[in-house]
Image: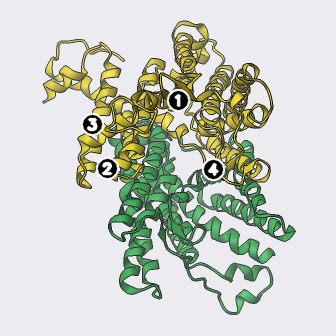
Amino acid sequence: MKKLIVKLLGGEKLRMARISLFAILVSLIVGAVILLAIGKNPLSAYGNLLQGSGFLPKSSYAGRQNMFTDLMSFLDALTPMIFASLAVAVALRAGLFNIGVSGMMLAAGFAASVTVGHSALAAPIAKPLAVIIGIAAGAVVGALIGWLKYRFNINEVVSSIMINYILMYVFTFYINTFFLDPISRQSIAITDASRLTLTNVQAFGLKFNIPLAFVFALITAAAVGFMMNRTTMGFEIKAVGLSRRAARYAGISISKNMILSMTISGGLAGLAGVTYFCGYFASIQPGVVPSMGFNAIAVALLGNSDPIGCVFSSVLVTIISKGSIYMSSQQGVEVEMSDLITSVILIFAACSEFLRMYVDKLSMELDPGREVSRT
Amino acid sequence: MIDTIIIDGLAFALPMFIMAIGGIFSEKSGITNLALEGLQGFGAFTGGLAAVLVMQTVGSGSQLPYYVSFIAAIIGGMLYSLVHVVMCIRFRANQVISGVVVNILAMALTSFLTKRINEGVFSQTSNKFVLGTSVRITVPGISRIPVIGAVFRDVYPFEIMIVFIAVIMWYVMYRTPFGMHLRACGDNPHAADAVGINVNRVRTAAVIISGGLSAVAGMSYAYSISANFSPDIYLGFGYLSIAALIFGNWSILPTLGACLIFGFARSSGQAIIQQLGMPSTYNDIVRILPYVLTLCLLIFFSKHNNSPRALGEIYDKGKR
């Protein structure tokens, strides 16, 4: 048994990815046990998750829909998730825990909706402008949290939770008072010209949505990866995250990098906000903090705060959350099941560091002569 | 109007105070506890479930469900806090991350289970356990004194309970060997270990205590503000209480002051809205008051705090 663990998880090559995969596997087994306990077939339930996300064909489709429609809708939901997980990852690298992604998303979505979304601007101007306003709004909130942390030593978790609720209540007030659509009980829908998702496109005899920002999300992930691994800025941010004292000794400004990383993180969260509220959706529901900001923490931890890892884990978590609606309709399982599986993944991801040390210890016991790998 | 501010403010502040005491126990022992939010929610869930089950057998007139629910909540909160214990002490996870994970899990688990149980046991589709608000007690005589008398008017029974528990907890923290050991573990775990204190055992006990106390708070909110258990109980009160204990400098009496300030800010905001006869949507603006106040107070007090020195550090015997 011990040998098997060491064989599977020891060694250098892609080990964090393998440990993450191990965490996912264990979580899926836990999920399967829960499903069995309530008398459902876990295999068909997990199959439903894939079917609902457009990776497997469903047994029947409505008119002008097929697997491709589902896949496009899945990508539409995936886009903001990638941005949100990158936001968490950048902050994590600087040693900051950004739990305020939800609030930043709301700020970006609200700012873009009321300025561009309700204006009569033409599509070529409106779409980029919405993105820019979203980035700016998110970055301002992020910078504020970073500044509070540096200047007043306020724990970023506490301040961002406070800011989440403050923003949520303020926007709820504004939406309910000025921008309420009396029928849908949500904010007034934004114009199609400013929406970042092309809805109901008709081609090949199908009707589907095109998330315009999806390719941009992949490019952003690559750009964040480049910034983190290949530039001075990324190096400094990582140095501050690894050891503040060592970074200060090396002449790296802690205040600058802390605020900088929170600003970048906020900008990415802003992108998540516009692609979520002005893309995947076209309106904001008052009184709700989007849960995507919290799921993004799971995604970033699972992806080991590596941008490419974030993309892969975003796919996984989005399959679970997006496919859960179909699973719920097919199996009669509550939609909350998906959150449950995601949070179990989160538990194992949080313990991955322990697992890494444990595997090191095991491999040392089995093979005392060998040099133990670091990191 | 001042009377309602005092009555509502106390009903909000005291549960927050007991939760903050739980946080102080955990943090004084050296474990950062952001899990208070999840612990209070999970406690309210088990308590709510117990109350609904008991209500079915004894009928709604009895006071029994009320007291059973608090006991069940404390047990539930203590058990659930073991998740944080296992992650922080056994698996050496980052304590901040672990706390947030515990909260997210609590949210997912309780909303899943609530729906499941409502469907399976009570065969109805609903995401809440309806509890109703608890009875209120008015102390005859003293309550007729103007202004101060309001403290004794329309008191929820849980407020009295909380005051009792708080006094006991204060005694445990500052007047017993256990409290002494606990504070030593948070300030200098190696020294504590050297005199023969089992650091991890003390910390485990501290987190379990915080679980039980948070559950009392969660149950109190379920019986007063929301009148039911539903996922809406996760309103960030746990984080507010953490802010209160930071503001109170990790000691119990100043924390009470912080909680009272939050409570009165909240109730006076609502009273003002009512007094001015503004539409109900304006309530949302007032709801931000405790949060804004927290931020402002943290700005002034975070810099000069003296947090437990080993707070958030995983205890490693071999270090140094």
Q: Are marks 2 and 3 on the same chain?
A: yes
- Under mark 4, the amino acid is Ala
Let me know if residue A363 appears in the view: no
Q: Which mark is residue A331?
A: 2
Other residues around mark 4 within 10 Å, as few (<14) / some (14–19) / many (≥20): many
Residue position marked by numbered label 3 in the rendering: A26
What residue is rendered at 66% in x and 39% in y? A106
- Under mark 3, the amino acid is Val
- The correct choice, above or below, for A61 with respect to A357 in the image is below
Q: Colour of chain B?
A: green
**First-in-chain label (3 vs 1):** 3
A348 horizontally vs B30: left or right: left
**Label 2's element?**
helix
Residue A288 x %, y %: 61, 49
B228 horizontally vs A364: left or right: right
Q: Nearer the viewer, residue A146 or A74?
A: A74
Query: Gap between marks 1 and 2, in whole Å?
Result: 25 Å
Query: Gap between marks 3 and 1, in whole Å?
Result: 28 Å
Chain for mark 3? A
**First-in-chain label (1 vs 2):** 1
Let me know if residue B46 appears in the view: yes
A369 horizontally vs B168: left or right: left
Q: Nearer the viewer, mark 2 or mark 3?
A: 2
- Under mark 1, the amino acid is Asp
* Chain drawn in yellow: A
